[in-house]
């Protein structure tokens, strides 16, 4: 019989884990199991092995300067895990960057696929322009979330709040550059998880923007790396793997690639 674990209790357990104030029963419950329970019911495509890796990197980089940033948060699945690691470490916030499209922002293209178009603070954005969403995928997965919530942002925040992470998560509606423009010039991040626009130019722009703000010893992580998204893979190869400023580069799971920025001498 599968035992259901309470997400709120799991969040408290993870927070206490690194402070060693958690009850012995929770210490011996694998983090993998706790993370599965924490994100149960949260729509998304991030598998548990990838969530576990992100949690581990976010936990082990607690001694590095800066906050955590995620580009492409969707319903909050990976944001919840990054926030849990931040709470467990007792430091830093998680900045969640997404366009958070409304139901009315989506449109069906002449070929039957779907994409979205919107304006935020006077700037026009497009989503799934190069690689559109197949009709079957939209109707069976993407579009399903709008059956209960007209606003993706509201669903995202509901998921964050229910799991006790609202005190560490800072959502931003826009793109990475618009977030950075609002932060001090010397603001740093210790971990960045890029899962936004998968077009080559867009990924390159995100890499260049975050590279300036990634602290020495910080981690740069990518979703959908070296899969069917050629733009993501090409950008990583040219701007990260070939960059001598990164001392460790590795495909960690089926679609998660990570790189660590060299520490200062």
Image: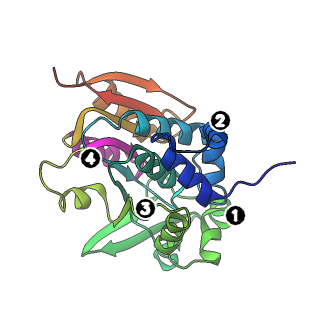
Q: Position of residue 148 (x, y in %)?
A: 63, 77
| Cβ atoms at labels 3 and 4 below 8 Å apart | no
Magenta stretch encompasses residue 204: yes
Q: Which mark is residue 140?
A: 1
Q: Please state which of the two labelled residues, at mark 2 or mark 4, is closer to the viewer.
A: 2
Q: Position of residue 183 (x, y in %)?
A: 18, 58
Mark pair 2, 1: CA separation: 38 Å
Q: Nearer the viewer, residue 220 or 81?
A: 81
Residue 220 left/right relative to 250: left
Q: Please state which of the two labelled residues, at mark 2 or mark 3, is closer to the viewer.
A: 2
Q: Please state which of the two labelled residues, at mark 2 or mark 1, is closer to the viewer.
A: 2
Residue located beneath label 3 in the image? 127
Residue 33 left/right relative to 193: right
Tell which circle, 3 or 1, labels the residue nearer the N-terminal end: 3
Tell which circle, 2 or 1, labels the residue nearer the N-terminal end: 2
Mark pair 3, 1: CA separation: 18 Å
Q: Position of residue 54 (x, y in %)?
A: 48, 39
Q: Which residues are magenta?
A: 189-211
Q: Which mark is residue 151?
A: none
Tell which circle, 2 or 3, labels the residue nearer the N-terminal end: 2
Q: Nearer the viewer, residue 116 or 236?
A: 236
Residue located beneath label 4 in the image? 205
Quadrant position of residue 73: bottom left
Tell which circle, 1 or 4, labels the residue nearer the N-terminal end: 1
Residue located beneath label 2 in the image? 28
Mark pair 1, 4: CA separation: 32 Å
| Cβ atoms at labels 3 and 1 below 8 Å apart | no
Mark pair 2, 4: CA separation: 42 Å
């Amino acid at each position: 019989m599968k035992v259901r674990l309470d997400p709120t209790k799991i969040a408290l357990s993870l927070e206490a884990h690194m402070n060693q104030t958690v009850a012995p029963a929770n210490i011996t419950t694998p983090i993998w199991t706790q993370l599965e329970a924490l994100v149960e019911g949260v729509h998304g495509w991030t598998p548990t092995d990838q969530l576990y890796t992100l949690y581990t990197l976010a936990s082990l980089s607690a001694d590095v300067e800066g906050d955590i940033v995620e580009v492409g948060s969707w319903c909050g699945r990976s944001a919840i895990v990054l926030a849990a690691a931040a709470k467990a470490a007792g430091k830093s916030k998680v900045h969640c960057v997404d366009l958070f499209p409304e139901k009315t922002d989506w449109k069906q293209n002449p070929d039957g696929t779907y994409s979205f178009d919107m304006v935020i603070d006077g700037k026009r954005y497009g989503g799934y322009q190069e690689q559109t969403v197949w009709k079957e995928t939209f109707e069976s997965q993407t579009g399903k979330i709008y059956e209960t919530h007209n606003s993706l942002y509201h669903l995202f925040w509901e998921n964050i709040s229910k799991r006790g992470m609202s005190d560490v998560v800072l959502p931003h509606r826009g793109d990475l550059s618009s977030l950075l423009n609002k932060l001090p010039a010397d603001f740093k991040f210790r971990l960045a998880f890029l899962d936004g626009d998968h077009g080559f130019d867009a990924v390159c722009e995100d890499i260049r923007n975050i590279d300036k703000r990634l602290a020495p010893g910080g981690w740069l992580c990518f979703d959908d790396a070296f899969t069917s998204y050629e733009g993501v893979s090409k950008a990583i190869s040219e701007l990260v793997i070939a960059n001598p400023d990164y001392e460790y580069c590795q495909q960690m799971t089926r679609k998660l690639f990570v790189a660590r920025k060299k520490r200062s001498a």
